């Protein structure tokens, strides 16, 4: 097991290129189950979660050809509809295979998914929608057993917006009989990216960027070529890193339009930000001002940037209130930030942060993917010694070569074996 060690206090300077989005690549790879032939996906990041979904799909008979920065996928020899527990338990996104398997095979046996413990992410909304599309399901020994001769279109309302639920049902609906309408659907950029891929495969989908998506089922699809969008959460993490270190960096290969809520909050904190095309330049202020945030689904402030933003507020001037409305257990990183001298009080879904002049180096333990990033940002800002971040296997699930990118920006950071 690895750990990351940081000697903080260096303002970040230079240019960093953003990788492809994990949360767009995973459903794109799953969508390749929908039809045979070689699909070509560009800008696929090299991450543990990508390795996991490839391992799961390989067990189903799917073939992969890895190339630098791209992935070719072929499901011509699909020979199973069961995903094994030993792989699925490590990644919640594996539930994305349910919809495509039902659309292609008419059957699926999916182990209930696992992943990092940031709160309940129930799949009941997926199952309710599939039931409305004619799927018969039962739970047996931790597996969802599902079957349908052919899916049928339905009018589906999600009680709450669900990203993976919207993606799963879209994939299930593209070859269903008739029309499927998804209401109160998620609007995240990753949804739009999947729509673009499915359209390249021949799907008939309308409602881009809205909470009502209409899919007219077609008889068959074709293999496609598609480029994965840049990772907005990685870009946001580097934006916060520049601010917390009072640095000055250029972020390339990103989509500023996907980061509007964060840009507004960082400017309120004092950062100077300029956007041009797919680039963002950001310079941190001498004095970081306190800013309140409230996480909400896109286009609101992303829950996946809440922990990183909290690290920034730990050295801001004054008090800030952070409200988490998406996941009920996403303040696990607070106890670790307190080890570094942070002043934070938790009251239910709210965290009250009193900014301090500086954070102190300390050994800390990562508890989930985004908490890992928040502790690294805190370590970049801490002065007077070394911060050790343990259990960073979470980090490798969602950030491609993060410590190397920080090192190229002037950070003193390296990885060691425990």
Image (cartoon, rainbow, N blue to C red):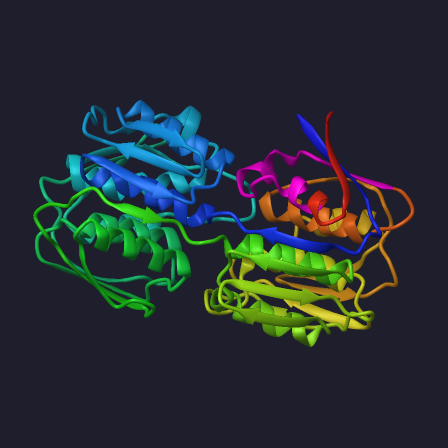
Residue shown at 22% from the left, 52% from the top? 200
Residue 330 visible, this angle: no
Residue 393 colored in magenta in the image: yes
Task: Check the image and report above or below for 78 versus 397.
Answer: above
Q: Position of residue 225 (x, y in %)?
A: 28, 45
Q: Nearer the viewer, residue 195 or 127?
A: 195
Q: Where is residue 69 in the image (x, y as percent from the top left)?
A: 44, 39
Residue range of the region highlighted in magenta in the rendering: 386-406
Residue 209 colored in magenta in the image: no
Residue shown at 51% from the left, 58% from the top? 254
Quadrant of the rendered structure where residue 342 is?
bottom right
Residue shown at 42% from the left, 54% from the top? 229
Task: Check the image and report above or below for 137 versus 263.
Answer: above
Q: Position of residue 334 (x, y in %)?
A: 72, 52
Task: Check the image and report above or below for 288 versus 99.
Answer: below
Q: In the displayed image of the protein, which residue is found farthest to the right?
A: 384
Q: Nearer the viewer, residue 271 or 394?
A: 271
On the picture, is 175 further left or further right than 84?
A: left
Residue shown at 28% from the left, 43% from the top? 31
On the picture, is 47 further left or further right than 213?
A: right
Quadrant of the rendered structure where residue 203 is?
bottom left
């Amino acid at each position: 097991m690895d750990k990351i060690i940081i000697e903080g206090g260096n303002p970040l300077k230079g240019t960093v290129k953003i990788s492809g989005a994990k949360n767009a690549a995973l459903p794109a790879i799953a969508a390749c189950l929908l039809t045979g032939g070689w699909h070509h996906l560009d800008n696929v990041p090299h991450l543990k979660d990508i390795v996991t979904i490839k391992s799961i799909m390989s067990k189903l008979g799917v073939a992969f050809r890895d190339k630098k920065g791209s992935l070719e996928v072929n499901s011509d020899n699909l020979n199973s509809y069961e995903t094994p527990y030993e792989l699925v338990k490590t990644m919640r996104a594996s539930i994305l295979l349910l919809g495509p398997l039902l659309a292609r095979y008419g059957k699926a046996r999916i182990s209930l998914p696992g992943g990092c413990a940031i709160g309940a992410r129930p799949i009941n909304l997926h199952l309710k929608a599939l039931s409305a599309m004619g799927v018969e399901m039962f739970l047996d020994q931790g597996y969802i057993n599902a079957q349908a001769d052919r899916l049928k279109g339905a009018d589906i309302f999600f009680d709450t917006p669900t990203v993976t639920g919207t993606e799963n049902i879209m994939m299930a609906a593209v070859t269903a009989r008739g029309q499927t309408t998804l209401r109160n659907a998620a609007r995240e950029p990753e949804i739009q990216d999947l729509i673009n891929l499915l359209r390249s495969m021949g799907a008939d989908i309308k409602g881009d960027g809205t909470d009502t998506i209409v899919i007219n089922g077609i008889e068959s699809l074709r293999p496609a070529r598609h480029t994965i969008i840049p990772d907005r959460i990685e870009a946001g993490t580097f934006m916060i890193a520049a601010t917390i270190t009072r640095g000055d960096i250029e972020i390339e290969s990103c989509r500023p339009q996907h980061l509007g809520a964060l840009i507004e909050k960082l400017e309120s904190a004092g950062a100077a930000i300029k956007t041009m095309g797919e680039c963002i330049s950001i310079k941190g202020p001498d004095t970081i001002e306190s800013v309140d945030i409230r996480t909400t689904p896109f286009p609101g402030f992303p829950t996946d940037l809440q922990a990183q933003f909290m690290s920034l507020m730990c050295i801001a001037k004054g008090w800030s209130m952070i409200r988490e409305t998406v996941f009920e257990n996403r303040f696990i990183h607070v106890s670790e930030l307190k080890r570094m001298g942070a002043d934070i009080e938790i009251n239910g879904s709210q965290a009250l942060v009193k900014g301090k002049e500086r954070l102190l180096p300390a050994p800390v333990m990562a508890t989930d993917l985004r908490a890992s990033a928040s502790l690294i940002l805190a370590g970049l800002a801490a002065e007077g010694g070394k911060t050790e971040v343990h259990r960073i296997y979470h980090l490798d699930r969602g950030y491609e070569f993060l410590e190397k990118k920080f090192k190229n920006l002037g950070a003193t950071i390296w990885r060691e074996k425990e």
